[in-house]
Image (spheres, coloured by chain):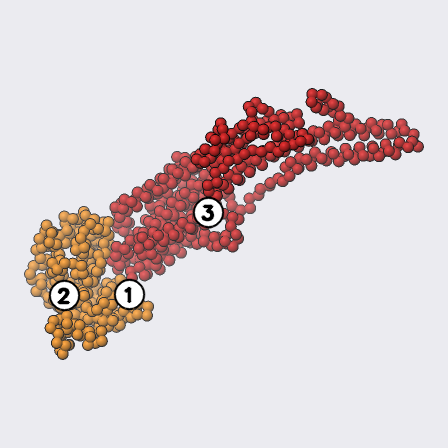
Chain colours: A red, B orange
Amino acid sequence: MRWLFIKDLQILRRSPLVTTLLVVYPAVIAVLIGFALSRGPETPRVAFLNEVPQGQTLVLAGTEFDIAGARTELCARIDCIPVSNEDEARDMVRSGDALAALILPSDLIDRLESLSTLSPSQPTVRVLVNEEDPIKARLVDDRISSLVTQANLRISKQVTRISANYLRLLLEGGNFNLLGQTFNVLGLKNTERILEALRPELPADSPSAGALDRVIQFSRLARQNLNLASPVLGAIAHPIDVQKEVISGSPPSLDSFAIAVAVTVTLMFVTVLLVAGSLALEREENAFPRLTRGLVGRTALLVEKVGLGVALSLLVTLLMVAGLALFVDVDWARFPLFGAAIVAGGAAFAAFGAAIGGAAREVRASSLLAFMISLPVAFVSLVGSGTVSPILYDVIKVIRALFPFDPALDAISGGLEAAGPGLGAAVLHLAILTAAYGVLARLALRRFAA
Amino acid sequence: MRCFMALPDDPIPFLGVFGESATTGRSTDGRVVIETQGLVKRFGEREALKGVSFAAHRGELLAVIGPNGAGKTTLLSILAGIRRQDGGTVSRDPGEIGWIPQQAALYRRLTVAENLRLFAHLEKVPDADAAVDEMLEQTGLGERRDDQVGTLSGGNQQRINIAIGLLARPVVLLLDEPSAGLDPRQRERLWEFVLGLAGAGTTVIFSTHNIAEAERYGQRLLVLADGEALFDGTSNDLHAAVPESGARDFEQAFVAFLRDRGH
């Protein structure tokens, strides 16, 4: 078996295209993903045009609104790129330099302030987007809607707070400023107290006594009910609260998941293509009958091919992780765990590749078959629950269980980070798939010499 | 220097493998080294071999001939151990059986020497490097030992193919259409080499479509048609089996023989 292994390495060394791909492919993927991760997926670039006159403040019912704070908060959630005019904003969006442009019109503050007057005028902000693809459009819609909702909530809370102050003034009484003049408001509580003090001074048979009692009762009822209005206003401003509870799954960080996806995709393509092609080559070169007539057992040949796939894919994927480590943090203390996950995943992919190579029996056909099966399997393995119909998701779950991509992704995610999926179950799943595809490959070899 | 199948443009001239005596030493010692009894092989519904029985002796040259689809390659692949028969038995003397497939079974991206060394190691030849050097000398490809096999001509690839089959010094050598694709000069040198092996005691069983070649080099002929062994004997015996055919040469006699038996 040692001589076969050396022979395969010699053949690889003499195949510059394949060898180059094996080294260049993971390096390119590592650099691309590294750049993508280091840019930070949580902060999309948005061109920001503020047409509100500088120095203008927002005052709602006498209370100044913190515009600078709101802008800081907004720009913490998106990567604000200040632009000086609308044409510049349009150019940035059109060229793809910015995901969208947010334009605050010059009358925004006036319209916001009108909300606390008797003639409110709804303020608007403008959003320019480039919907060249549906995913980007969806992302922009979701992100901008979220930002606008956040802004509305802040303003709504401010208006609610002002309204509550008015109510308190009505209840408790006090001073009130309007157009530079100070007015004193008696308040319901004081009204009730004054009326109750006057009531005993009226004669028992006074015709005004009944009317005064009714006014006192109204005053009490109004005070009691308006006391409840403040919490109700608060609830309206923020009607639904979210309590999140994780029922299943312990997702790893986005960085770890991205590394795991990149490593698993590379592991899949390198191993499946290499093993399928290497096995098919034995037949294409007519060497298989010569080898298996007593020189090498068919099972031993399969073991050699799987070993070759595992060894080279481990090398390639570790190279890739090392490349990614230049951009994001990789916990090298967990190397034994994610190394084991890569080996287990590599073995399952190698056995899968051997089954393909055994079935296809030609290098080109095996490569084509490997791509045709692996790509859709990788794609459906990344489909999340709840995003497709229940029946379709059941089908996807079966496909995931039958192919090594999903358990390999789980194992590598779990190996990279403690918060990831359980490593043990995924490795066991991979071991079962390795054995199953190994048996299929062995059966395929029965007709290999034909 | 010993070599075989030297090409016209080869720098090393052909000197003969075992000298002139090789072509005349076509006698056997009568010891059976391989024998089949009632061999049956089926591919689905089709019966490729229908109870084929024969024996080959030490140092004998046995030609297996027959029309396309007769079962020649199937018979040789069962003798080589590549396929399993569905019925019947194969018994043979202890020792290696060398098998040389019709199409070169070589790794084109490996060099000539690497191919020989790989199979020498797999055959567990005691001194692999010495065996490689010996085969390079015999094939006359010593100067091209570091060339990738894919860059060699078909004739030179066939030389390496045969050399690999000889690495383990087999007692029985199976050749499937060994001269297919070779020019007349290459063919002649191939047969001189094969005759030399037989003269040294190696039993050679070869299949061929070339009837003249079978008559010329086969001490015995085994005629297969539709999986049946129709004839086992010398070329003279086959001629004698069709006395009324009016055949002028062996090929016509062979065709008449098959026609006479409904093939």
Q: Do the residues at pointers 2 and 1 share their chain?
A: yes
Query: x, y percentage for residue B74?
Result: 25, 66
Three-letter code for the amino acid on which mark 3 is drawn: Leu
Residue A198, above or below B253: above
Query: x, y percentage for residue A239?
Result: 64, 39
Residue that label 2 marks: B213
At horizontal 37% and vertical 43% (from top left) the residue drawn is A317
At horizontal 27% and vertical 51% (from top left) the residue drawn is A4
Question: B3 or A145: nearer the eye?
Answer: A145
Badge 2 element? helix
Residue A367, above or below A328: below
Q: Residue furthest left?
A: B20
Residue that label 3 marks: A382
Q: Is residue B79 visible?
A: no
Question: Where residue B84 is drawn, which disc sits there?
Answer: 1
What's the distance in space between the residues labelled 3 and 2, CA to CA?
Answer: 64 Å
Three-letter code for the amino acid on which mark 1 is drawn: Arg
Name the mark nearer the viewer: 3 or 1. 3
Nearer the N terminus, badge 2 or badge 1?
1
What's the distance in space between the residues labelled 2 and 1, CA to CA?
Answer: 29 Å
